[in-house]
Amino acid sequence: MSDVPSSHPRYLSLKLRDAIVTGVEKGITSAHGLIAHGRGEAFDYLVGEETQAFAEAAIRSAAAMLLRASHPVISVNGNAAALVPAELVSLGAACDAPLEVNIFHASKERETAIEKELRDNGAPRVLLPLAGATLDHIDSNRRYVNPEGIAAADVVFVPLEDGDRCEALRKAGVEVVTIDLNPLSRTARLASVTIVDNVVRAMPLLIDAVGTLKVCDEEELNGIVSSYDNEAILDEALLRIRHGGGYHPSPDIRGCFRR
Ligand code: PTJ
């Protein structure tokens, strides 16, 4: 761990760097994950390093989508496991979804290390990809899935994803919920719901939203999902990036998450 004093103006950001570096040292995160994290940091500056109205709207819709799913699955990669392991376990419990390890940079050792990290954080069961079960429309290591998990899912939550699997899942008719600070990424563009926010800020809010919406019936959940427009949300995130501190959420977006 670094010795950054808590008075440092970039303390929170530096603590996150520590968490990602620790992830690499523990064999959870790939070295490529450090680069992905740096890209995330850059976009976090641009969205103001706080949860914006467009992210709140997406969080509400994401929670509704996860709750109305018959078989939701939470996909976990090396960056997510380093940054928010306990929150992933809590989300799984809140929406009754299994956690499944699915990584881009192939490594059996890393899969096992991620599984252990999730179990150490309280996960009762962690699914691993199996060589016999594969997704169509994808050639990377992410094609290997678990028959009881992603292979059978109707909604998959994929924080910090690279675009290829999101596209494959959408082609297979599966809904994808993602957290991605880059509103221009392929994942952000192809997902059903994109939460443009830092995973460390968004996860507790998503868990809370699932808790709040748990009382809704199917019709209410359908209403929340169908009134959500991912393209409009991404356009709103781009407005924040373009206008910086001068950005004001459009009335439609406020309406979307307050409805
Ligand atoms: O563990 P593996 O092998 O599955 O690899 C995981 C990474 C993240 C390395 C892999 O999926 C990858 O290369 O992803 P990309 O293509 O770099 O995409 C990651 C996306 O997450 C980028 O759009 C980043 O801007 C975004 N991102 C990075 N850190 C955060 C983030 N979004 C939200 N919160 C973050 N902390």
Image (cartoon, rainbow, N blue to C red):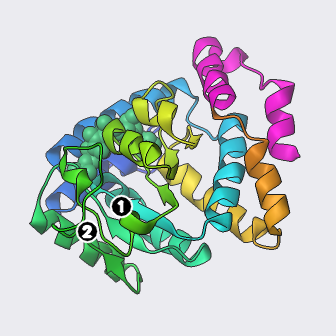
Viewer-side residue, 240 vs 215: 215
Please, which residue is most extreme toward the bottom here?
A: 124
Is 257 within the magenta? yes
Distance between mark 2 and mark 1 Cα atoms? 8 Å
Circle 2 sits on which residue? 114
Q: Is residue 29 above or below residue 108?
A: above
Q: Amino acid at mark 2?
A: Ile
Give the x, y percent position of residue 61.
70, 50
Segment tinted magenta in the rendering: 231-259
Is 217 within the magenta? no
**Residue labelled 2 has its Cβ within 8 Å of some atom of ligand 1:** yes
Q: Is residue 109 above or below residue 143?
A: below
Asked whether residue 218 is in view, the answer is: yes
Assign a secondary structure to mark 2: helix
Assign a secondary structure to mark 1: strand
If the image is split into quadrants, where does the N terminus sit? bottom left
Viewer-side residue, 155 vs 9: 155
Most common secondary structure along the magenta stretch: helix
Label 2 crowd (10 A; few <14 / some 14-19 / many >=20): many
2 and 1 marks in contact (CB < 8 Å): yes
Viewer-side residue, 205 vs 223: 223
Q: Amino acid at mark 1?
A: Val
| Residue drawn 43% across the image and 52% down it | 158
Q: Does 4 sit left or right of 240 as displayed?
A: left
Q: Quadrant of residue 231?
A: top right
| Residue drawn 32% across the image and 39% down it | 164
Give the x, y percent position of residue 8.
44, 41
| Residue drawn 28% across the image and 63% down it | 145
Q: Is residue 9 above or below residue 235?
A: below
Which image quarter has ligand 1? top left
Circle 1 sits on which residue? 76
